[in-house]
Image (cartoon, rainbow, N blue to C red):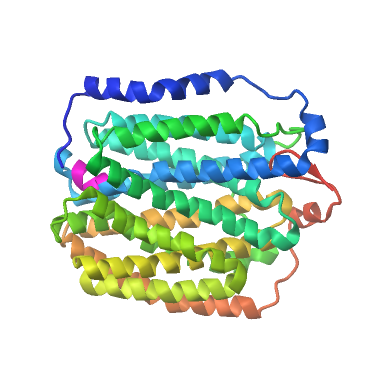
Amino acid sequence: MILHGCVYERLLLFTNCARHAGSVLLKGIFDDGCAGASHSRIVHRTRRDTREVRTAVYLLVVLTAGAYLPSPLYPSYQHAFGFSDLTMTLIYAMFALVSAPALLLFGSAADTFGCRAVLRISVVVAALASGCFALATGPSWLLAGRAAQGLALGAATGAATALITEPAPAGNRARASVLASTAFVAGTAAGPIAAGALAQYAPAPQVLPYGVHLVLLAIGWSRISTLAVPASRVRRWRPTRPHIPGGMHLLFTTAAATGFLAWTVAGLFLAVIPTILSRTAQIDNLATIGGVVGAVLASSVLSQPLVARCGASLAQLTGLSALLISLGTLSWTGGGSVPVTVLAAVAAGIGHGLAYGGASAAIDAAAPAGKRAAINSTLYLAFYLGAGGPAITIGLLTLWYPLATAVSWLSAAAAALVPFVGTAIVLTHRTPRPPLTDSGQNHHRRQHTTTPTGRTQQ
């Protein structure tokens, strides 16, 4: 499908989609929402916590969906703008290249300013990203849009995840972590499925998906206005350093490696499998391409509830086994066979959900309350690098080899790492975890703790 139409026509259509969104954004931009906040925190604590968790889940789904709307459209963009496979993988990986420093820069911002301010900024930047894609006339627009998507989701990840997990009692922390990771993956699945269907069967295929996303962002903005304002801002904000409490080093390393592999496999399907299906299997139906890509994340969503039942360690080991099956299949076929690729997608999704969800649950169960947003951001740094780094490697390999060959080689290399990571998980599970050695231990032991939303718990 070839992109067409001038920028002016796209601007008119996109403006119509944005009109309602803009009015909602402007209405709340200077609203501080402080009236009655103290009384609400005391009288309606449980109801407020439930509402805020729902808001955080909604925003994670919408922001991640927007970040992966372009996945089934990459073959169309590549055909229309005439860029190489390397450029295509760079466009995809730009998201990870920007979200990684964004996580370090804004990972602890929610611990200082509260989740409300961080999430508002994220929504605005995500809206700019959708605008770049809707008005795109060349690869530079796509690169700018992917950079904005990475900045938006990188800033929001720590805040939204902490908002979901903080209200949960210690015994339910694993379930809260599964909810956060499920929301993240559900959005990743919804993005390519919705974009593929809209691009194939609706008018303005390269504009309408982003206009719909802008409306969803406006709804998210209105929900952010209901979040509690931080009670105090006595802590200085500093960019997050990749620092983990001493007692968590081994646990964090294995969880990060597991999540890295899980997102490496997902990244292969999100970045290059659509082009391989279009080029090698001669599939030009964008809904079909979006469905294959979405099957990975849909299977992941369906498998993640099992994490709370079987435990973080067993979930990671089972997930790695499924990932090994998917990687072995891709290394054999290179993604060129549709039936085999669909089977590999389902196996990848099951493995992704268990491995990624188990890694997140393991860290959330061990992280001190006052450090949770920063630690989660550092963990997601590994996830984003897993999704983007291997895609760039494939792009570089395409300078000398066909795309399918590059996919086969990288899949084989990733598969070779799976046994080592699995062994590390077993050793970590058998090794008693030493007590935390940094300030997070003392903060966690205090009777009164300040959460990332600025609330005080007893």
Residue 361 position (above or below residue 274) = below
Q: Position of residue 68 (x, y in %)?
A: 37, 46
Give the main secondary structure of the magenta stretch. Answer: helix
Q: Which corner quadrant holds the N terminus?
A: top left
What range is drawn magenta here? 73-77
In the rendered image of this protein, does residue 235 appear above or below residue 74?
A: above
Say which residue appears at 20% left-offset and 58% top-offset: 277
Residue plotted at (17% across, 27% down)? 5
Q: Position of residue 20 (x, y in %)?
A: 44, 22
Is residue 240 among what the camera can see? no
- Left or right of residue 9, residue 52 in this image: right
Residue 351 visible (yes or no): yes
Is residue 255 a member of the stretch shown in magenta? no
Q: How many marks?
A: 0
Judging depth in this view, the residue of 434 and 164 nearest the camera is 164
Seen from the viewer's position, the closer of residues 119 and 4 is 4
**Side of 199 relative to 194 (left or right):** left
* In this view, 91 is above or below 406: above
Q: Quadrant of residue 308?
A: bottom right
- Is residue 74 covered in magenta? yes
Residue 111 point in image, percent of width and height: 68, 41
Q: Is residue 291 left or right of residue 182?
A: left
For residue 247, above or below residue 221:
below
Q: State the image coordinates of residue 212 (x, y, percent, origin top left).
A: 38, 34
Q: Residue at x 54, y 72 (%)?
A: 315
